[in-house]
Amino acid sequence: MAEQPTRKAPKATEARVVHTERITPHMVRVVLGGPGLDGFAADTYTDHYVKLLFAPEGVAYPEPFDVERIRAEFPRDQWPTTRTYTVRAWDPVHRELTIDFVVHGDEGLAGPWAARAQAGETVRFLGPGGGYAPDPAADWHLLAGDESALPAIAVALEQLPEGAKAHAFIEIADTAEEQKLATATGIEVTWLHRGDRPVGEALVEAVTALDFPAGDVHAFVHGEAGFVKELRRHLRLDRGVARERLSISGYWRLGKSDEGWRAMKREWNDQVEREQEN
């Protein structure tokens, strides 16, 4: 018997692939459009995200697509699998949504889909969500993250007000993964090449070694949960940054699937907060 949903499911948006572009060896950009994006908006936060919906192999859903109906009529193992991705750009004039995907061959679900996506292909998603935008009143901004946070950091840099000061640290595999980002006077972008080092090690070193400018800092730190935990402790305890001046969270965790990490993320965040408050 199919499991009954415990709450009303959100309505999914349907879009079509307009075109794709491999912007670095391991980053694929997918631009989505179509009439399904009428009424969509993602212009409040710089970390807007959507949850892409992927049907399990061999499963087909009735039309019109309805998440609530699917959850009511299909067993849980046939529900769509979700993958969360940052909105890299939203063009309200042309109604086009851009998403960047990290791709490592056939590893994962969304990355391989992006690598083989064809123009005209349909994709559905939930959202957008989001909660961070650089505070124009801050004296300076700190942005730090790995590849998973790169799209959100790029959007934040593009939307910083004129005259803003910022230090952005972005850890990537190597030089080939660097991208051209919007920069202006007062904005310093540091690319950290991971090589064979553990994920986040270079980021932690760079942020802890930074000579913090004077004044109020607004910080955005996202990526692999291990280094996020270290930097949250450093910023809260060593630097004395108030919790409300931090947008900080683990997008993913080494050794955990997306589903496994989502299942434990809230409890993990609460535990980290308790540890760092004691």
Image (tube, rainbow, N blue to C red):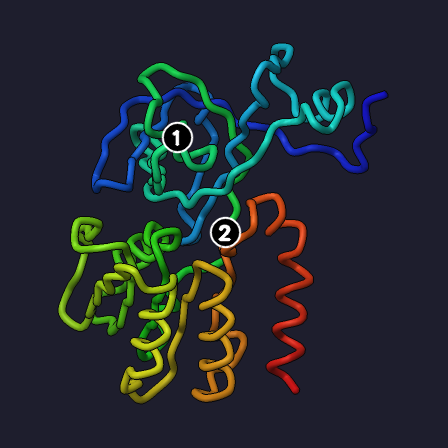
Q: Secondary structure at mark 1?
A: helix
186 up-or-down from 121: above or below:
below
From the top left corner, tell me how far across and down residue 270 is, in percent: 67, 68
State which quarter of the image contains the N terminus.
Answer: top right
Number of residues whose C-alpha sits closer than 10 Å to that of mark 2, classed few (under 14), some (14–19) or many (20 or more):
some
Q: Which mark is residue 267?
A: none
Q: Residues within 10 Å of mark 1 (few under 14, many from 20)?
A: some
Near-viewer residue (198 or 7): 198
Q: Nearer the viewer, residue 113 or 150?
A: 113
Instruction: Give me the residue at 34% from left, 67% from top.
Output: 143
From the viewer's perspective, tell me whether residue 250 is left or right of residue 99.
right
* Residue with the mark numbered 1: 112
Extreme residue in the left direction: 185
Q: How many marks?
A: 2
**Residue located 51% across and 25% down the image:** 124
Quadrant position of residue 269:
bottom right
Asked whether 183 or 228 is in front, the reply is 228
Vertical relation: 180 (above or below) 105: below
**Residue at the spot of label 2:** 130
Which mark's residue is nearer the viewer, 2 or 1? Answer: 1
Residue 6: horizontal and vertical position, in percent? 81, 37
Give above or below for 259 relative to 22. below
Indicate the position of residue 135 as horizontal and vertical percent values: 39, 68
Horizontal placement of 88 versus 64: left or right? Answer: left
Where does the image place residue 233, in percent across and percent down from the top left? Answer: 51, 79
Mark 2 vs mark 1, CA separation in Å:
25 Å
Q: Residue furthest right?
A: 1
149 sits to left or right of 262: left
- The residue at the point 42 percent across, 66 percent down is 221
Q: Residue at x 32, y 18 (%)?
A: 118
